[in-house]
Image: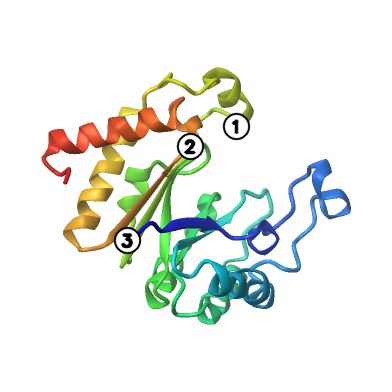
Amino acid sequence: GFRACMKVWERITTRVFPEHPRYGERAGKANPDFLSTELFAEHVAAPIAEAFADFIGPLILEIPPSRAPVDVVAWETALVRFLEAVPPALQCAVEVRDPELLTPGYFPILREHGATHVFNFWSRMPDIGAQLALPLSMPGPFVVARLMLPPGITYEDAKQQFAPFDRVVQPQPKMRADVVRLIELAVERGFEVYVVVNNKAEGSSPGTVRALAELMKSHGSAP
């Protein structure tokens, strides 16, 4: 009865490789395998079908941030091509980390292909409430949220401030209210909801989950 979200291999989801030693000669260069349907079929879809089909939930395509300009036509064309090639049994949730990728065609493309948008709480993105307010932002029939990193804080800063991650250090009441609103809207529409919580959202993932559950209960929306 347990289904898991899974992030898709970064070789497929990275537009431009970050300037980081781990990427060697590829650092700073455009990724020729961005949204490769061939690599996805061989290294993601086939292994899932063979070994994890009974447990797979949404596949998260996290598109890392990049300073490279966004070619709207190229981005939307690549997204359509990719989603058209995904086997119907798999659910795809696209997580953009550049606001520029929230193009006019983005949400309609997701809706047309049975995919959804990942509502993310992450430093460089509009907050979840702002994302939810965008037209067609909840195409259904499932919803994914990822609570990752407060605005203005780097990953390393959060790691140092929040370790050892055994308590909520920096509560985010707006984030919590936005997530509960998101869940309530999804449930009203009969959509499945997945909320993935990182320790670096507030300091402790279990603490954030508990706070969300209590807030839902106070709204009368908890099961």
Determine the residue positioned at 57% across, 75% down. Answer: 82
CB under 8 Å between discs 2 and 3:
no
Residue 179 placement: quadrant: top left
Q: Would residue 160 appear left or right of 91 to someone viewing this image?
A: right
State whether residue 151 appears in this view: no
Residue 164 is left or right of residue 71, and the answer is left
- Residue under circle 2? 198
In the rendered structure, which disc, 1 or 3, sits on the residue that comes first in sequence?
3
Answer whether residue 38 is visible to the viewer in this image.
Answer: yes
Q: Amino acid at mark 1?
A: Tyr
Residue beneath disc 1? 155
CA gap, disc 1 to disc 2?
A: 11 Å
Label 2 is placed on what type of residue?
Asn
- Nearer mark to the viewer, of 1 and 2: 2
The residue drawn where x is 46% and y is 21% is 166
Residue 212 quadrant: top left
Foreground of the two, 27 or 198:
198
Residues at badges 1 and 2 in contact (C-beta under 8 Å)? no
C-alpha distance separating marks 2 and 3 = 22 Å
Q: Position of residue 75 (x, y in %)?
A: 59, 68
* Residue at left offset 37%, top offset 28%: 207
Q: Residue at x 44, y 77 (%)?
A: 89
Q: Secondary structure at mark 1?
A: helix
Residue type at the position of mark 3: Met
Numbered label tally: 3
User: Few, some or many C-alpha atoms within 10 Å of disc 1 (few <14, some 14-19, many ≥20)?
Assistant: some
- Residue matched to label 3: 138
| 2 or 3: mark nearer the eye | 2
Instruction: Tell me, yes or no, whether the two marked residues, 1 and 3, touch with CB atoms within 8 Å.
Output: no
